[in-house]
Amino acid sequence: MSHPLRLGIAGLGTIGAALVHIIQSTDNRLSVSSLRTVEITGVTARTRNKERDFSLDGITWFEDASSLAVSEDIDVFVELIGGDEGPARESVEKALQAGKHVVTANKALLAKHGVALAKLAEEKQVSLNYEAAVAGGIPIIKTMREAMSGNKVNRVYGIMNGTCNYILTRMEDEKITFEDCLKDAQRLGYAEADPTFDIGGHDTAHKLSLLTSLAFGCEVSFSSIYLEGIEEITLSDIEAANTLGYRIKLLGVAQETESGIEQRVHPAMVSKESAIGQVSSVTNAVAVEADQVGSLLLSGPGAGGKATASAVVGDIADIARGLKVPVFGRPCASLKPYERARMRLHEGGYYIALDLLDKPGAFAGVATRMAERDISLKSVVQNQRGKEVDGIKNQAQHVVIITHETTEKAISEALESLINDGNVVGKPKMIRIEKLD
Amino acid sequence: MSHPLRLGIAGLGTIGAALVHIIQSTDNRLSVSSLRTVEITGVTARTRNKERDFSLDGITWFEDASSLAVSEDIDVFVELIGGDEGPARESVEKALQAGKHVVTANKALLAKHGVALAKLAEEKQVSLNYEAAVAGGIPIIKTMREAMSGNKVNRVYGIMNGTCNYILTRMEDEKITFEDCLKDAQRLGYAEADPTFDIGGHDTAHKLSLLTSLAFGCEVSFSSIYLEGIEEITLSDIEAANTLGYRIKLLGVAQETESGIEQRVHPAMVSKESAIGQVSSVTNAVAVEADQVGSLLLSGPGAGGKATASAVVGDIADIARGLKVPVFGRPCASLKPYERARMRLHEGGYYIALDLLDKPGAFAGVATRMAERDISLKSVVQNQRGKEVDGIKNQAQHVVIITHETTEKAISEALESLINDGNVVGKPKMIRIEKLD
């Protein structure tokens, strides 16, 4: 145990650079706390001759990730390349195959190939650590995989995409449209040039798929996630939510139901008073509800080089300390197949906003269609006649309905009937209300 | 590694009973997640013949904790007795001496003898785990001791006593006096018959002393903690805080300053908008600010049998997995001596409430005394003349002052001068404002 732990780092972007800084810092906290010297022996990155604010003296440069992954001179392969195929997947597989421990921040890779990689790690008796892959610097993997060992999880949910939360927070605070917020987020570097991956909820879904496996002891099943992004959230939804005591957040939620495990990513109304409702801007937060510990909430920075590198360092320290923990919290052989809950059986309250033709009986029709499906209404707000709705002057009335607990099936059938009745202008908006304690 | 991990449990109160339930549950999650069978081989408790809702069949009963601690038939000694001396200390020492791993929920014991016990554990190469000792079910020890390995902590603070937070929350929400809230807390089992330990801040200080050591790599120094309880918080303080955008919380805070490490437990004004300001009732929360990860916040149940047992199980699982981590995050030899910051050098904003004789120049005197010490005022609220203050009709004016950042020395000197001036009725009230990002 006394020989140094040797790292090979693939990828020297923001996270890689922050990682090198931590390990090269003079006080070397990592070595102190893990009781073992940790050093970087090899690196690789896209460009070799680039100005960097740290020295690579004494560190071997590798031309590609895969040759670093199998180098005799490393014990741990740190994958910070990204992407669910290509060099990232290839190098991680090679590293595990060669009996190297792997630390990765790559949610896409694990969401797609997590179980296969976990099997390989298990077979080779090495670690596959991925704290940085979910909610950046927040130690949610360690919490669920280790600290909550005695618990049966009922639900895990969270705000796991800073871009979306930044946009939704600004829309609420400053009454700026989705499009303008997105532009600002891009200018400030909080959103990519192609923002689809974030605002469409895919990024959240990648992270959620890993938490689901840890929570319920099942295989990772990214493709089964019900997915809805925040693209269609308007200022009028945000304002209606506000009036009703809610905020709109992009949540990832996994919960056990009678028909299987629900995995869903969608904008949700959460109480302003709830802990998750108070998580603003780029901050992330994950809550876990379990039979023993009750409800835990962890919040902090979900992105950024230093915060993410902090999580990578924690993973490396665990390897230095000799910690052996199954990749998804239990041996691969005992991971249950993922059993998908039917989204139509989802139960909860709903926010419905629709524009109704201003003619006799139109409103009564709405009430009737809801009643037919046993949907009881908690509140109904009807704007004044002829009011300008979302910038368009029309002759419709804007109606906002909050329902009591019902099913997705009932709601979608009721909305379908309403549309068929011909009194609804445009498309009704439906946002799920997440029930929180 | 394949022989079962054998536990000896000393203490079968609420936590002990919850622990037995988790380990005896049919799905045995602990064994699954730690890849090793975990079983209870010995127990001891105050009363042997007591009705219990679990079976002790096949488990050896020991007459006292110390003989259980050294039993050949256990690998891990779980101390749930409590108290900083007597059987708890004796049995933990004997267990470590005999080369047994120890898991304890005993904050008082570790606050007083933590370093000596850590040295013993280190010498015997066994674990001494204490997740349950701080903030119940919240994995703050694991987070600081393992996940934050690459970080330099700047400040750690939190709400770590449910009784105090319950009282302060009810005072605010229901305008009930401190005394009445305390009575209710006692009736509901949230407060002990002798509540001094909780409301005087001692319990919070025990917990803080352990976090300080983890945060700053120094020896535990409980006796150096600046301590002030919530006994003197009145409804009028709570209302003034509310008006000014604050809430009053009993905080434990440790932070690095130029003159050393500040450790303080006192009622503090925190912004209503802050995450810590929104932690209500018996919930606990701990925040850590560090150079790499930024600011993390963990919240959840700080007490209760099941939640605390969940933390104990996490500690046992770590031992089952073979995790070796230094008791206070680094080898005892490298723990720095605790260097106490001078409280008079503490910097922050202050809330001052005082009753001032209604005579010419009295108010100007306050302003002058503050200005003499370079204390600049952020806001001053003066109640109408002759107003009833805290139920007493008097001729005084109630003045509430919020200062900008200044020092403890300046404030206490200014207050002293004011008292000497003879215009202040009764004792001025001073509450520190905790600066949060």
Image (cartoon, coloured by chain):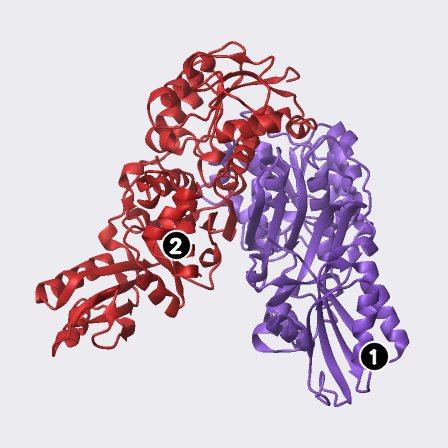
Chain colours: A red, B purple
Quadrant housing residue A95: top left
**Distance from the alpha carbon under mark 2 to that under mark 1:** 50 Å
Q: Secondary structure at mark 2?
A: helix
Q: Which mark is residue A318?
A: none
Kind of element beneath mark 1: strand
Q: Residues within 10 Å of mark 1 (few under 14, many from 20)?
A: many
Camera sees residue B181: no
At horizontal 36% and vertical 47% (from top left) the residue drawn is A183
Q: Please rate how many residues cluster around mark 2, counting C-alpha atoms within 10 Å: few if below 14, some from 14 to 19, many from 20.
A: many
Q: Amino acid at mark 2?
A: Leu
Q: Nearer the viewer, residue A367 or A185?
A: A185
Q: Does mark 1 fall on the same chain as mark 2? A: no
Residue B3 image point, x, y percent: 56, 27
Q: Is residue B66 left or right of residue B277?
A: right
Image coordinates of residue A313 in percent, x first then y, are 56, 30
| Residue A389 against residue B134 in the figure, above or below | below
Closer to the camera in the image, B247 or A174: A174
- Residue assigned mark 2: A168
Q: Is A227 placed left or right of B406 in the picture?
A: left
Query: Chain under label 2?
Result: A
- The answer to whether A39 is drawn above or below residue B267 in the figure is above
Q: Which mark is residue B424?
A: 1
* On-image quarter of the N terminus of chain B: top right
Q: At 46% from the left edge and 55% from the top edge, which residue is drawn?
A: A276
Residue B32 is situated, as x and y percent measured from the top left of the image, at 46, 35
Q: Nearer the viewer, residue A425 or B54?
A: A425
Q: In this picture, is B151 found above or below A423?
A: above
Residue furthest right in the image: B420
